[in-house]
């Protein structure tokens, strides 16, 4: 008969009786990395973007440089789902100038995505994919207490190898990425020795608890295993701008939320949303829904519809505030163009160019011409793209906004447009 040794410390008695753990009984294969990958794999996505690039074709002779043609080029990247409504984070450079964006989910499905917003300086972008059911998400951590040497896991799409995993540590924090002229391109980055390659961009850098602590963004090309990730707190701080209803859904809701976080070791992040400008403005609910964090709060705001007319925010002290919903203000250049020229215009983007099957990606797309207006008399039509006004090149709404006040009250102004695949010039008679 097996006997247990009784000792004075009664709390130790159960341990003395427990069966010993051996290498044979422990599952040594189920490491922290395995558990993290299983926890997060369905929320990490592969991204493919198609953009149009200029390429010079080879001529028939060695001295003939050939014609420059515009051809589609594909790029690969990674991302991760931050909200069940289909919001995906990636790098700006992954989707910059993209005409088409496709996202491959963890279950193999491929869906088209829309670019919601992008910040070139922070190298962050938000995409939106539509699915009939809520999507799995990855948990956002906090990067304020990163420890040099703590383990990290990178998941992504390097070189097109879907859902590849690499491991390493936090090699350093507060790194700046500079160009050859020592100008800072990205600041306050996390450095890691986890293997990061082209295609990993936009994917998550995870801690040992499966929380995102960084967004993989760059590597040192002349070295091995020196990679960099944007701190997740940078993303969390930019959510009010990246998911602003006035920009995304073109609805003006006159409120701004921020996030207050409490971090408890080893990896518990408690987040509360705060209504800015209100003393003690801790948010209890938005339209009856309790936001889990800043991402969830703005996802709730983005569900608002014009017919709803109001958004109600209940605060933790029991009070509530009501905010009217109205259409976002039209940019000044758009209203000026409508008043002075009689046209409705829209900033041309690569994705808009793809939608209308246009061969150019810069300029101002005319969507409507008022009957009897000076634009109509000049022969301008919906679908034309304004690229020149007077002697000046026009690429953006900002360009047009600067030029319109300078137009003469009377007289003729030269306008350059692209119609179909041809460039044309005409004269607008100002009156």
Image: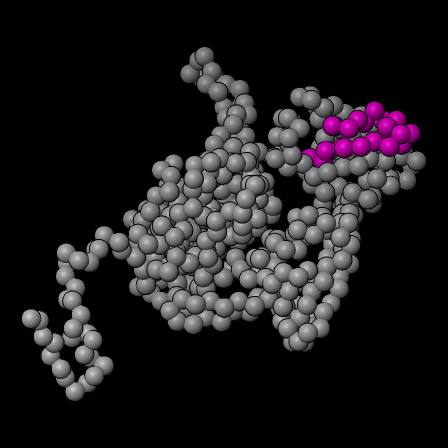
User: Is 379 included in the stretch rendered in magenta?
Assistant: yes
x and y percent of residue 382 in the render? 77, 28
| 69 relative to 331 in the view: left or right | left
Q: In this view, does 373 lie above or below 271?
A: above
| 329 relative to 102 in the view: left or right | right
Residue drawn at x 76%, y 32% is: 366
x and y percent of residue 381 in the render? 79, 26
Kindly tell me whether residue 124 is visible in this rendering.
no
Quarter assignment of residue 17 = bottom left
Q: Is residue 91 above or below residue 103?
A: below
User: Is 431 included in the stretch rendered in magenta?
Assistant: no
Kindly tell me whether residue 32 is visible in this rendering.
yes
| 186 relative to 11 in the view: left or right | right
Colouring rule applied to residues: one colour
The one nearer the camera, 250 or 385, is 250
x and y percent of residue 426 in the render? 80, 25
x and y percent of residue 380 in the render? 81, 27
Q: In the rendered image, which quarter contains the C terminus?
A: top right
Looking at the image, the residue that sits furthest to the front is 1
| 228 relative to 121 in the view: left or right | left
The one nearer the camera, 401 or 359, is 359
Residue drawn at x 43%, y 72% is: 264
Residue drawn at x 38%, y 39% is: 162
Please state the extent of the stretch shown in magenta in the rendering: 362-383
Residue drawn at x 64%, y 37% is: 349
Looking at the image, the residue that sits furthest to the top is 60
The one nearer the camera, 114 or 33, is 33
Number of numbered markers: 0
Q: In this view, does 312 lie above or below 97?
A: below
Looking at the image, the residue that sits furthest to the left is 1
Q: In the rendered image, which quarter contains the N terminus?
A: bottom left
């Amino acid at each position: 008969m097996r006997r247990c040794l009784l000792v004075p410390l009664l709390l130790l008695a159960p341990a003395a009786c427990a069966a010993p753990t051996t290498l044979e009984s422990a599952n040594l294969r189920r490491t922290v990395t395995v558990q993290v990958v299983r926890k997060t794999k369905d929320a990490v996505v592969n991204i493919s973007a198609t953009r149009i690039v200029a390429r010079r074709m080879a001529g028939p002779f060695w001295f003939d440089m050939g014609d420059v043609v515009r051809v589609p080029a594909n790029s690969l990247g990674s991302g991760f789902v931050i909200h069940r409504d289909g919001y995906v984070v990636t790098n700006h450079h992954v989707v910059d100038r993209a005409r088409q964006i496709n996202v491959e989910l963890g279950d193999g499905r491929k869906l088209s995505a829309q670019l919601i917003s992008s910040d070139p300086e922070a190298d962050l972008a938000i995409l939106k994919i539509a699915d009939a059911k809520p999507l799995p998400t990855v948990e956002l951590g906090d990067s304020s207490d990163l420890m040099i040497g703590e383990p990290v896991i990178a998941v992504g799409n390097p070189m097109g190898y879907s859902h590849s995993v690499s491991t390493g540590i936090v090699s350093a924090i507060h790194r700046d990425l500079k160009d050859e002229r020592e100008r800072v391109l990205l600041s306050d980055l996390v450095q890691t020795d986890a293997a990061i390659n082209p295609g990993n961009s936009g994917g998550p850098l995870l801690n040992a608890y499966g929380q995102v602590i960084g967004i993989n963004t760059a590597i040192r090309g002349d070295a091995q295993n020196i990679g960099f990730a944007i701190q997740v707190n940078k993303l969390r701080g930019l959510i009010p701008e990246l998911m602003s209803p006035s920009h995304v859904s073109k609805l003006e809701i006159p409120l701004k939320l921020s996030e207050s976080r409490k971090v408890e070791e080893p990896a518990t992040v408690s987040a509360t949303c705060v209504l800015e400008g209100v003393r003690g403005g801790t948010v209890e609910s938005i339209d009856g829904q309790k936001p889990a964090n800043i991402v969830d709060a703005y996802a709730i705001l983005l569900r608002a519809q014009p017919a709803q007319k109001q958004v109600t925010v209940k605060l933790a002290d029991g009070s509530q505030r009501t905010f009217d919903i109205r259409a976002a203000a039209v940019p000044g250049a758009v209203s000026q163009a409508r008043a002075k020229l009689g046209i409705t215009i829209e900033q041309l983007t690569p994705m808009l160019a793809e939608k209308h099957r246009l061969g150019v990606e810069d300029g101002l797309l005319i969507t409507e011409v008022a009957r009897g207006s000076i634009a109509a008399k000049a022969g301008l039509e919906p679908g034309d793209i304004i690229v020149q006004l007077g002697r000046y090149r026009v690429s953006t709404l900002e360009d047009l906004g600067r030029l319109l006040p300078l137009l003469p009250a009377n007289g003729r102004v030269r306008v350059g447009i692209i119609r179909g695949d041809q460039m044309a010039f005409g004269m607008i008679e100002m009156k």
